[in-house]
Amino acid sequence: MKAKTKVKLISLSLLVTTFFTFGCYDMIRIQPREVVKLNNTYKVQVGSVRTGETTRKNIHGEYETEYEQEPIYQASVRHLIKHNGSTMSVAGSVPVIITTDKEKVELEPPLISSLENGVLKIRSSNHPPKEFELRKIKKVEVKKLNQPLTILFGTGASLVGAGLIVGLVFLLI
């Protein structure tokens, strides 16, 4: 295989891997007062369920069984009011992006926030404590994973990648 072809294949596989790793996100605008509802959100593994098993001989000739486990997660669910007045549900912890006239701050979970006298006080895992006057906040958004879209585009990218690989192999033969 030519060096250029190898580089293209490696680049394509990295692109598909990166896409599946990061995914597609929806930026959903919420009312600034709703940020305090995102305190103490979580997603934790609470157990697992057996999904399969494999039996084989070990080096001593004895049979061993390995069990495949699928994790079970429990996540907090919060109901937030969007900017337009409709409601939405958020499961687990989500990043929050606060935009003012002067800055745009992305806050990663866990979040600890309070609302006092028209001032939103907030701190997060990636940012020191900060205060925002509600009247100066232009918009607040939550970053929510769009899993169906991620799977759709990731599968499409994988199929295109597989088609390109097959096409390149036939061109090189």
Image (tube, grey):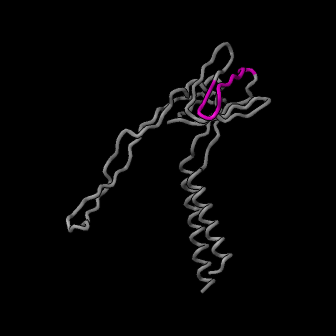
> Which is more toward the observer, 34 or 61?
61
Q: Residue at x 69, y 31 (%)?
A: 98
Where is residue 24 shown, x and y percent of the image? Answer: 60, 49
Q: Indicate whether residue 141 is drawn in magenta.
A: no
Work out whether 141 lies above or below 130: below
Q: Residue at x 30, y 55 (%)?
A: 67
Magenta-colored span: 122-135
Residue at the right extreme of this rendering: 102
**Considering the image in quadrants, where does the N terminus appear?**
bottom right
The quadrant holding residue 163 is bottom right
The quadrant holding residue 44 is top left
Q: Indicate whether residue 132 is drawn in magenta.
A: yes
Q: Main secondary structure of the magenta part?
A: strand
Residue at the top extreme of this rendering: 117
Q: Residue at x 67, y 36 (%)?
A: 106
Where is residue 157 shown, x and y percent of the image? Answer: 60, 62
135 left or right, relative to 88 = right
Residue at the bottom extreme of this rendering: 173
**Considering the image in quadrants, where does the C terminus appear?**
bottom right
Where is residue 45 shown, x and y percent of the image? Answer: 40, 40
83 left or right, relative to 70 = right
Work out whether 169 lies above or below 147: below
Residue at the left extreme of this rendering: 62
Work out whether 148 lies above or below 118: below
